[in-house]
Image: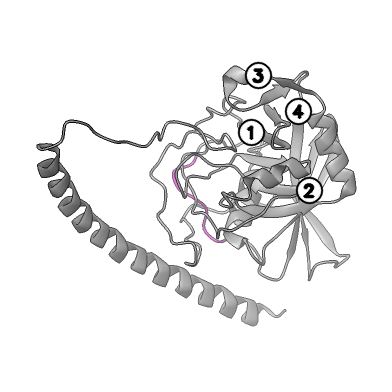
Amino acid sequence: MGTEKRERQKQARQARIEAAQAEQRKRAQRRRYLTFGILAVVVLGAMFLYSTFAGDDSEDTASGSTTTTTAAIDQPADAPFVYGDGACAPGTKPDEPVLDYTAAFQDCLDPDARYVAVFDTNQGEIRVDLNTTDTPGTVNNFVNLARNGYYDGTEIFRTDTSIGIIQGGSPHTNDASDPGPGYNIPDEGDGYTYEPGQLVMARAAGPDSASAQFFFVGTDAASSLDGQGTYVVFGTTDEAGIEVINAVLALNEDDPASGLGGAPSETVTINSVTIEESAGAAGDSTTTTAG
């Protein structure tokens, strides 16, 4: 595709993003007014009540995601993905991984390119086709983190045979309590169903709370998450990748006290995550490796 056409696509996408951000600001203002009114009613009503009812927001969701560090972007499921204004990752990885950020990434992907994430682990390689068609914002976030070395040298810290997943993406602590990169991204759609081979974003109990942690689906047991359907599926691997996922899952040692299933009986290391970018449509043989 010519440079001029690609630039027009970028400008059109940026216009959609700015329109979505403007609408989001309007919704936020309306919510503030509405919240103030509701709080006033609640306070008055509480004077006549002798008991209260509250949901338990402290419990992790089935994916056991990270504790969030910033307020999540509030975005309806059908709204355009709202990007941040953080700088794109460079073409080559920095000497030291970049783990902490002040904002989510701006839109950095070529809309005509194909992106493949290559997980080099001590249990084998997992190649993942990233879905830029349905989840471009989530893929953009993951690609930029990977190109900055965020996942290199991290561990798969969770294995849960009850839902057939393995989880990673926590460079600060190598566990579910990791504070994340310093921002959250919106949930990109809902109604997902889960099956072997998928790469999925983990998140905390509230909506729009994903940032960097992810999980791989190894078995059909993950279909028990279908009723939630809000963990964003943004890539798929092949049979060879599923074999590696299940080899890690087979190392599981149950840990009922954790509430997250268990963990591998030996250290499972993600040596690196490399992003391969094809010069054309999916299946194009011309590929460059970046990060």
Judge the density around disc 3: few (<14), some (14-19), many (≥20) Cα neighbours within 10 Å. Answer: some
Label 2 sits on a secondary structure element that is loop
Label 3 sits on a secondary structure element that is loop
Q: Is residue 52 left or right of residue 85?
A: left
Q: Which mark is residue 269?
A: 4
Residue 102 drawn in magenta: yes
Q: Earlier in the sequence, mark 4 or mark 1?
A: 1
From what the image shows, is residue 251 above or below residue 286? above
Q: Are marks 1 and 2 in contact (CB under 8 Å)?
A: no
**Percent x, y of residue 33:** 19, 57
Q: Amino acid at mark 2?
A: Gly
Q: Earlier in the sequence, mark 1 or mark 3?
A: 1
Q: Earlier in the sequence, mark 1 or mark 2?
A: 1
Task: Report the mark closest to the observer, 4 or 3.
Answer: 3
Q: Earlier in the sequence, mark 2 or mark 3?
A: 2
Q: Which mark is residue 96?
A: 1
Marks 1/2: CA–CA distance? 30 Å
Q: Which mark is residue 266?
A: none
The residue beneath circle 2 is 197
Label 4 sits on a secondary structure element that is strand
Q: Is residue 156 visible?
A: no
Judge the density around disc 2: few (<14), some (14-19), many (≥20) Cα neighbours within 10 Å. Answer: many
User: In which image quadrant can residue 277 be found?
Assistant: bottom right
Residue at horizontal 64 percent and vertical 41 percent from the top: 214
Image: magenta residue range: 101-107
Label 1 sits on a secondary structure element that is loop
Task: Report the mark closest to the observer, 4 or 1.
Answer: 4
Which secondary structure dominates the residues rendered in magenta? loop
